[in-house]
């Protein structure tokens, strides 16, 4: 069976890690037709649209996208491409697996971290409802709805049940935001009652951040509103080596976009030293979503073996390999598993 996937390489190091990832996916033997669409900061600034119509049209056709980083300006300029995609395609669940890679030196390399973070992706402060009341006084509205809260909670529990996860922790600040986070927490509690086989716990977000640093190996799955999810998922990525390592997926009822969550790193673009691990692992999630579980496992095993061997790692994770050398090692390991 052939699959068609929208490929959005992005800018900066995006095209380099995207090309490397395509090679790794093709090494698994899964027949994919890549529908490549260009989306860069320059294109967005010239068009005046965070997501030009041709990008949306492609994802609507394929229903599956693989996306590299796109440069987003800070404190001004156009809306984040990631935020715009999630809103326009109703990609309500951001899913970030965070796992220790063997051989990778980190502060927590002996902890054997293996958790999944489920982040509500469409509302909260990311609704973007801001208003300057008077000069130098701004209000930003935090939007929490029952529909979105139930939807992400149910997605997390369904996912956990499907893959054999045993515990879900809801992360919140309902001790202070009793209405907004209180509603989110009530929805999580109600959904949890439908899944008696999964242990349900709750943690206030600041305590959760501390516990993640103290005892990351004790966490299984976490579900939380948008803003906390953004912060906590990056914190968790730091436990296993950083954003250059961890994969990400944005899931909707009709569409799915898999992405590297790191930045475009323009300072190293074109030097051939970028690390494609995050996008490769995201592609592994994509293959599983497409029903190609064996290929997904081959890709992940190839990545794991290259890290365990430690001979062909890029500079950001302590090695000296180029992007090309790292990719060739991944492909060779996948080929060896056939």
Image (tube, rainbow, N blue to C red):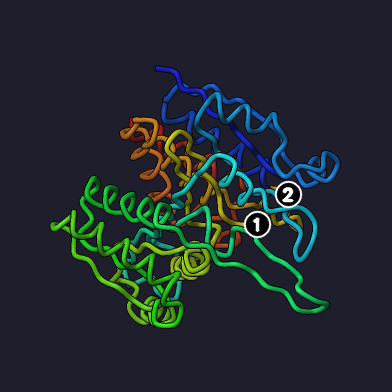
Residue in the picture at 42% in, 37% down? 253
How would you rate the neighbour count of disc 1 (Cα within 10 Å): few for under 14, some for 14-19, many for 20 or more? some
Q: Seen in the image, is 239 located left or right of residue 242?
A: left
Q: Seen in the image, is 74 located left or right of residue 89?
A: right
Residue 205: name its quadrant. Answer: bottom left
Residue in the picture at 72% in, 55% down? 72
Residue in the picture at 55% in, 50% down? 260
Residue in the picture at 72% in, 36% down? 52
Q: Seen in the image, is 59 located left or right of residue 298?
A: right
Q: Secondary structure at mark 2?
A: loop
From the viewer's side, name the closer residue of 171 and 261: 171
Give the distance between the C-alpha atoms of the residues marked 2 and 1, in whole angstroms: 8 Å
Quarter in which the C terminus is drawn: top left
From the viewer's side, name the closer residue of 261 and 315: 261
Give the image location of residue 167, x and y in percent: 23, 63
Give the image location of residue 129, x and y in percent: 65, 61
* Residue 53 position (above or below residue 322): above
Give residue 12's mark.
Answer: 2
Give the image location of residue 23, x and y in percent: 54, 33
* Residue 240 position (above or below residue 137): above
The residue at which mark 1 appears reads as 263
Callout 2–callout 1 Cβ contact below 8 Å: yes
Quarter in which the N terminus is drawn: top left
């Amino acid at each position: 069976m052939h699959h068609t996937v929208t490929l959005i390489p992005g800018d900066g190091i995006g095209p380099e890690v995207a090309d490397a990832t395509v090679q790794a996916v093709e090494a698994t033997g899964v027949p994919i037709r890549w529908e490549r669409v260009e989306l860069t900061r320059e294109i967005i600034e010239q068009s005046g649209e965070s997501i030009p119509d041709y990008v949306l049209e492609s994802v609507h056709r394929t229903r599956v996208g693989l996306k590299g980083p796109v440069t987003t300006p800070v404190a001004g300029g156009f809306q984040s491409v990631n935020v715009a995609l999630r809103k326009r395609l109703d990609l309500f669940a951001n899913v970030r697996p965070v796992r220790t890679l063997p051989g990778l030196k980190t502060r927590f390399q002996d902890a054997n971290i293996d958790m999944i973070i489920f982040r509500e992706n469409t509302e909260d402060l990311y609704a973007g409802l801001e208003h300057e009341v008077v000069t130098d006084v701004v209000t930003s509205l935090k939007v929490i709805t029952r529909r979105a809260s139930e939807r992400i909670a149910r997605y997390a529990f369904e996912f956990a049940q499907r893959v054999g996860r045993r515990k879900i922790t809801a992360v919140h600040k309902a001790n202070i935001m009793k209405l907004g986070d209180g509603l989110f927490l009530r929805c999580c509690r109600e959904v949890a009652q439908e899944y008696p086989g999964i242990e349900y716990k709750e943690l206030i977000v600041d305590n959760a951040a501390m516990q993640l640093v103290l005892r990351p190996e004790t966490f299984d799955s976490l579900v939380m509103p948008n803003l906390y999810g953004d912060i906590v998922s990056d914190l968790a990525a730091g436990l296993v080596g950083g954003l250059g390592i961890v994969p990400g997926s944005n899931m909707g009822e009709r569409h799915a976009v898999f992405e590297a969550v790191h930045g475009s790193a323009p300072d190293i673009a074109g030097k051939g030293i970028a690390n494609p691990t995050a996008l490769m692992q995201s592609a592994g999630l994509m293959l599983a979503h497409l029903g190609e579980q064996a290929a997904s496992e081959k890709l992940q095993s190839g990545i794991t073996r290259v890290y365990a061997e430690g001979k062909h790692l890029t500079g950001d994770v302590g090695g000296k390999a180029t992007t090309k050398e790292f990719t060739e090692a991944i492909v060779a390991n996948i080929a060896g598993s056939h």
